[in-house]
């Protein structure tokens, strides 16, 4: 019986040693090679002092090393923390400090960025003060928490008392180090936007991760003959299907490097050449595939499942792609990163002559080994068919947010069920049950929006703007951008005491300021410097009006 | 001004807002430089500035990974 995520690899390496586990940019690793490389990394980490429960950072572009790192870190008894290589250094430094990351795995191409990250971990970088400002984490630790970095060339000077080795120094091994780990141990921590402007770390255990891996593999009938396309970067929770469920069944996961995500014609070529059978991405990538993927010139008949999630998939584009890929089944995958997945909806194929429905696909029904309550604002269950917040209880659920007991407590709801205490996760998603029993997503309870599947907390964007010394008030709002994507716009009022010279503050200055603090997808496309805001009767900023004005402006500029 | 210079200026100044000065063999499609919206803006610029039509099937990694690659692509088209 396997009860740890790392045992996924042990089992598949025994059953399918010569089968390709991962491929990337023409290179590959068989299950046996992956096992040996992961064991080697685990030995290195243990020799360096990594212990059960430690957090080891992964700062990598999508590559074969991503897979080696995940399984190697687990085999050392530690949890992996995927850090977004494109995030501002202040944000990365915050996660390293907050999570107490002593060991980091990276690659040569990140060497200059690593120097900036190191400087930022000790507070020598713009933005650090703002990212950590309202939180109890020491902002300027006396020394950088990082001790050791794997993946940098021998002769490279790091400073800060941090030592390192190259990937070539890691010796593959047939055996993993002996460490005591059980299913309740932490397996990974993913940082996501927090509404107060501070990212929060979602903690998953071997138990929650493995439960997800099994349930997803079962739902889609994955086998060792499948070839999964990995679209999502490691710091995005959708990557867990490709890194956990694929290896669970001995399948091949094709890691799709960053450049393909921007070039739909190349992406469709890769899907054809690699004979992908499973596609799992945000709707944005599928819309791009339909509009710019030159599908007339491609044969994607190997695809048997097209899975999408992260945000609603506009019906017109979903059915458009279904027409182009008639042999593939389409399924809507639902579940916030805190619970991995809890429902799915297999989209029924259109019958001949049927007109294309206008509604986006429902999120489906909560799967068997999980249960839900839909509640109103007073924590009372709603009558079926009414709109309410979806709460889910599932063995795929996180244990909480890293060192944020306050946020963890607010995220969970406890009640008595079947003679025991049951813990539900409050998704913040408003849903409505349809007469056929499926749930439809209708919106958010808070001010979170999604763009290309990424969560943006509008409150966090405002907090970043207000962090600027000359900004008095800020309002951020989402407006539709290209199909399947949103963009943030914002308006600010400057402080009255700003001097005449300071009033020369430009939009570009503000954009650069927030660009050092927020991930690129959350940085506003536009910041208007206003003298007044529309207000509601109670004096609050009327963000709805600002948003409508922006939408009207965009609509006019398009015609 | 040659094609590479024109592209360098457009990408550095317009697409990247002066955030960074790109070189002819920088990987434009890595994590840091151009996102998928940027790619579409770049293609529109190429079509406009060099008075050509770039079909979807030509918008590939091979043709657009670097400024040099775009230059090679443009030269091939004018043969």
Image (tube, rainbow, N blue to C red):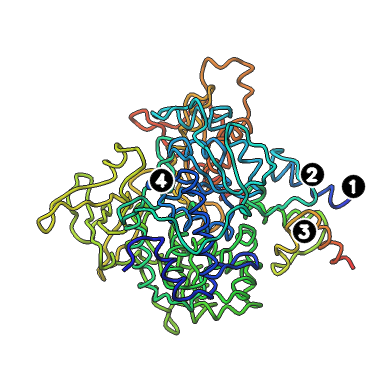
Which quarter of the rendered picture does the C terminus of chain A lie within?
Answer: bottom right
Depth-wise, is mark 3 or mark 1 nearer the camera?
A: 1
Residue corresponding to mark 2? B9
Q: Chain of mark 2?
A: B
Is A274 situated left or right of A384 in this image? right
Residue corresponding to mark 3? B47
Q: Earlier in the sequence, mark 2 or mark 3?
A: 2
User: Do the numbered discs 3 and 1 sit on residues whose CB atoms are within 8 Å?
Assistant: no
Q: Chain of mark 3?
A: B
User: Do the numbered discs 3 and 4 sit on residues whose CB atoms are within 8 Å?
Assistant: no
Residue corresponding to mark 4? A51
Q: Which type of secondary structure does the marked residue at label 1 adopt?
A: loop
User: Do the numbered discs 2 and 1 sit on residues whose CB atoms are within 8 Å?
Assistant: yes
Q: Is residue A113 above or below residue A482?
A: above
User: Do the numbered discs 2 and 3 sit on residues whose CB atoms are within 8 Å?
Assistant: no
Q: CA distance from mark 2 to mark 3?
A: 16 Å
Q: Which type of secondary structure does the marked residue at label 2 adopt?
A: helix
Q: Would you call the spot at circle 2 few (<14 residues within 10 Å), some (14-19), or many (20 or more)?
A: some
Q: Residue furthest left?
A: A419
Q: Earlier in the sequence, mark 3 or mark 1?
A: 1
- Label 3 in the same subunit as label 1: yes
Q: CA distance from mark 2 to mark 1?
A: 10 Å
Q: Chain of mark 1?
A: B
Q: CA distance from mark 3 to mark 1?
A: 17 Å
Q: Earlier in the sequence, mark 2 or mark 1?
A: 1
Q: Which type of secondary structure does the marked residue at label 3 adopt?
A: helix
Residue corresponding to mark 1? B1
Q: Would you call the spot at circle 4 few (<14 residues within 10 Å), some (14-19), or many (20 or more)?
A: some
Query: Residue at (48%, 32%) from the top-left corner?
Result: A131
Query: Residue at (44%, 73%) from the top-left corner?
Result: A14
Q: CA distance from mark 3 to mark 4?
A: 56 Å
Q: Which type of secondary structure does the marked residue at label 4 adopt?
A: loop
């Amino acid at each position: 019986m396997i009860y740890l995520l790392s045992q996924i690899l042990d089992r598949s390496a025994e059953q399918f040693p010569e089968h390709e586990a991962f491929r990337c940019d023409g290179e590959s690793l068989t299950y046996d090679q992956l096992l040996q490389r992961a064991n080697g990394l685990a030995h290195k980490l243990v020799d360096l002092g990594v212990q059960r429960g430690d957090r080891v950072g992964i700062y990598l572009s999508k590559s074969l090393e991503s897979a080696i790192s995940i399984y190697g870190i687990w085999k050392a008894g530690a949890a992996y923390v995927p850090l977004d290589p494109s995030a501002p250094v202040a944000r990365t430094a915050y996660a390293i400090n907050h999570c107490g990351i002593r060991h980091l795995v990276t690659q040569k191409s990140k060497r200059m960025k690593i120097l900036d990250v190191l400087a930022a971990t000790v507070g020598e970088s713009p933005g650090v003060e703002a990212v950590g400002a309202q939180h109890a984490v020491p902002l300027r630790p006396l020394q950088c928490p990082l001790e050791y970095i794997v993946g940098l060339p021998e002769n490279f000077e790091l400073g800060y008392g941090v030592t390192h080795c190259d990937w070539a120094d890691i010796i593959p091994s047939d055996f993993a180090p002996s460490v005591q780990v059980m299913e309740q141990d932490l397996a990974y921590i993913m940082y996501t936007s927090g509404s107060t402007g501070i990212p929060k770390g979602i903690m998953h255990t071997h138990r929650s991760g493995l439960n997800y891996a099994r349930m997803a593999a079962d739902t889609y009938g994955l086998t060792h003959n499948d070839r999964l396309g990995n679209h999502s970067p490691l710091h995005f929770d959708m990557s867990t299907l490709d890194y956990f469920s694929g290896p669970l069944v001995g399948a091949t996961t094709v890691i799709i490097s960053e450049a393909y995500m921007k070039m739909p014609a190349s992406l469709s070529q890769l899907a054809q050449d690699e004979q992908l059978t499973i596609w799992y991405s945000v709707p944005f990538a599928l819309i791009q595939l339909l509009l710019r993927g030159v599908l007339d010139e491609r044969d994607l008949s190997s695809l048997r499942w097209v899975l999408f999630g992260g945000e609603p998939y506009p019906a017109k584009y979903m059915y458009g792609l279904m027409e182009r890929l008639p042999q593939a089944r389409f399924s809507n995958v639902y579940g916030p990163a805190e619970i991995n997945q809890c429902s799915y909806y297999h989209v029924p194929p259109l019958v001949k002559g049927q007109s294309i429905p206008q509604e986006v696909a429902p999120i489906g029904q909560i799967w068997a080994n999980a249960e839900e309550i839909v509640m109103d604002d007073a924590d009372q269950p709603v009558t079926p068919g009414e709109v309410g917040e979806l709460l889910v209880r599932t063995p795929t659920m996180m244990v909480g947010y890293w060192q944020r007991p306050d946020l963890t407590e607010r995220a969970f709801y406890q009640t008595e069920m079947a003679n025991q205490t049951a813990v539900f996760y409050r998704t913040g998603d408003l849903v409505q049950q349809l007469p056929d029993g499926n749930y439809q997503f209708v919106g958010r309870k808070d001010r979170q929006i999604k763009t290309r599947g990424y969560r943006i907390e509008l409150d966090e964007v405002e907090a970043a703007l207000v962090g600027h010394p000359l900004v008095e008030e800020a309002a951020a709002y989402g407006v539709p951008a290209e199909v399947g994507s949103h963009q943030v716009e914002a308006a600010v009022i400057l402080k009255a005491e700003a001097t005449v010279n300071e009033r020369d503050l430009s939009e570009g200055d503000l954009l650069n300021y927030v660009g050092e603090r927020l991930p690129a997808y959350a940085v506003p496309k536009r910041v208007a410097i206003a003298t007044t805001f529309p207000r509601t009767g109670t004096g609050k900023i009327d963000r709805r009006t600002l948003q409508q004005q922006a939408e009207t402006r965009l609509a006019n500029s398009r015609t | 001004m040659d094609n590479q210079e024109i592209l360098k200026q457009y990408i550095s100044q317009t697409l990247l807002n002066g955030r960074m000065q790109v070189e002819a063999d920088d990987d434009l499609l890595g994590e840091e430089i151009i996102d998928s919206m940027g790619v579409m803006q770049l293609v529109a610029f190429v079509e406009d500035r060099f008075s050509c039509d770039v079909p979807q099937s030509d918008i590939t990694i091979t043709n657009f990974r670097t400024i040099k690659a775009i230059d090679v692509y443009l030269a091939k088209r004018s043969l």
